[in-house]
Amino acid sequence: MIFIKMIKSTIIFFCVLTPFVSCNGQNQKLYEYRIEPTTAAIGHPVSDLGKNIDCMLQDKNGNYWFASNGDGVYRYDNKTLLHITDKDGLCSNFVLAIQQDIHGYLWFSTRDGICQFDGKKFTNYTTIIKNAPIGRLQYKEGGLFFNHLNGVCFYDGNTFTNFVIYPGSYKPSMSDMNRPYGIYSTLIDNTGNVWFGTQSQGVCRYDGKTFTYLTDKNLAGPAVRTMFQDKAGNIWFGNNGGGLYRYDGKKLTNITEEKNLGNAEFLKGTFNDKPGSLARVWAINEDNDGNLWIGTIDAGVWKFDGTNLTNYTIKDGLSGNAIWTIYKDNKGELWYVTNGDAICTFNGQAFIKHDVPGQLLKSK
């Protein structure tokens, strides 16, 4: 196993912003949540979700938000589905991530910048984030991460701080858009470490002092699209080509290769989908029974009970074989965002599609 340690010395900041999803958790609390109302008086009612749905979030008040990469966002309060776009103040209709801060405000990371929604109006924070001071990452529980070109901005609920995860010896060319240290995913583990999944440099762990890279077994090369920590403390990495990895704190295991479910041609540069494979992992979550659910972008979803892997596709009632997100709501139910235009749940026997008000959060 290759575990490369790197002490951060030189900080370089880039101004181009790109969206970035972060995860919850960690040790030092900022202060208690002060949830502001998110009763949106903006947007207009629609009968169903649009296309290109990337992800979803349930806010602290129970409202569901759906991000569309091209069609703005949708908000569902269990009664009305509202469509909200740049005409309502959203900074772009190409929305790739939604987060909620310790105050209850929502943050939308988009193709064209980052904006905050306080329940009444949107405020564009792109310039503030871009020009935030450079410093050392000091993570506090409830803080948010926003990605920009090869760098990251951390928001602790009060202030923004920019930092980078790559070594000072790395000197990227501004004309080269290949950014190997670009961040695709983050995870805060239960001991307070911050993990970053990169474009092609594997996984970077920050323990508060040192950046350490985990790169072997094809973890470096393809992008690390998702990370997840299970109830037992194992950390799982989803790699777009290398497959599913488990890290128990000492050993890295490539479950995909172990189960002979890889796509060798994809790793060689022949970018073809492979039904029945577990090579292109984009989403990971865990159900209330401790089963791991792994979403692929080309071969449906897999259920892993720790020993056996079971594959579900459209043949089994799944609403699509491309799994963009597996989201756990406030009640512990898993939601599968498929093909960018359908959402479904699994009742233990069958998948149920949800796509219109009155049927969005209950079976058809």
Image: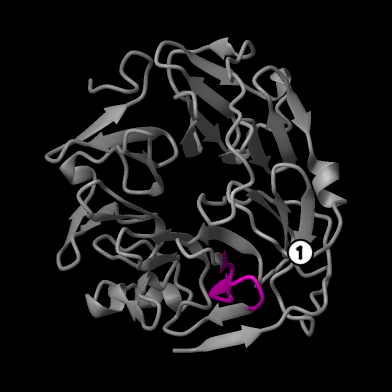
Answer with left or right where residue 41 lies relative to residue 255. right
Highlighted magenta segment, given as a residue range: 197-210
**In terms of depth relative to the viewer, which is nearer, 181 or 36?**
36
Q: Does residue 352 lie above or below 298 as drawn? A: above
Name the image quarter holding residue 171.
bottom right
- Please identify the quadrant where the C terminus is shown: top left
Question: Does the magenta portion include 9?
Answer: no
Q: Does residue 26 lie above or below 166 as drawn? A: above
Question: Does the magenta portion include 208?
Answer: yes
The residue at the point 37 percent across, 18 percent down is 356
Q: Position of residue 57 (x, y in %)?
A: 48, 35
Answer with left or right where residue 321 lies relative to residue 212. left
Q: Where is residue 100 in the image (x, y as percent from the top left)?
A: 58, 37
Q: What element carries label 1?
A: strand
Q: What residue type is labelled 1?
A: Phe
The residue at the point 51 percent across, 71 percent down is 222
Q: Name the residue under label 1.
A: 163
The residue at the point 56 percent across, 72 percent down is 205
